[in-house]
Image: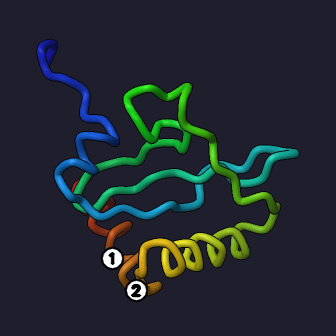
Amino acid sequence: MLNERRVTVGDLIDEGRRFVLEVGEYHEGEGFRAIIVFENHPGYFPSGELSNQPDAAPVLWWPISNRQEAQRMAYSHSKATLGLSRMEHMKIVMSSIGTQH
């Protein structure tokens, strides 16, 4: 719909939705770009869109070329910074996938 406002990362954080950083696309020389996945919200936000002012937020990278190792880094990040187990991390990602049409 034309009059609908685009949901932002800030909106979802304000709602209190849980989120994780997940492994996104690989970029030669940079590694895997981190993406932000919210619980029960379809899709994801590329890192660098952590606020309504994308230029103010950094792009986050998993600076390696091995996807499995990048995924382990994502799980470790969730545990260390958000207190989420690997299973909780995966449930958030799966809830996002489950809401996509």
Q: Is residue 58 visible?
A: yes
Percent from the top left, x then y, of residue 37?
Answer: 40, 56
Q: Are marks 1 and 2 in contact (CB under 8 Å)?
A: yes
- Percent position (x, y) of residue 46? 51, 42
The numbered mark at residue 91 is 1
Q: Where is residue 53 shown, x and y percent of the image?
A: 44, 26
Q: Is residue 27 above or below residue 20?
A: above
92 and 83: which one is in front?
83
State the CA–CA distance, disc 1 to disc 2.
6 Å
Residue sitting at x 42%, y 81%: 83
Q: Element type at marker 2?
A: helix
Residue at 45% from the left image edge and 41% from the top image edge: 50
> Across the whole image, how many numbered discs are drawn on residues?
2
Residue 81 falls left or right of residue 14 = right
The residue that appears at 47% across and 84% down in the rendered structure is 86
Nearer-the-camera pick, 1 or 7: 7
Q: Residues within 10 Å of mark 1 (few under 14, many from 20)?
A: some
Element carrying mark 1 = helix
Instruction: Name which quarter of the figure residue 97 lies in.
Output: bottom left
Residue 101 lies left or right of residue 79; in this view the side is left
Residue placed under numbered mark 2 in the picture = 87
Mark 1: amino acid = Lys
Q: Residues within 10 Å of mark 2 (few under 14, many from 20)?
A: few
Q: Residue furthest right?
A: 29
Residue 75 vertical position relative to residue 99 in the rendered view, above or below: below
Residue 32, compared with residue 46, is above or below; it is: below
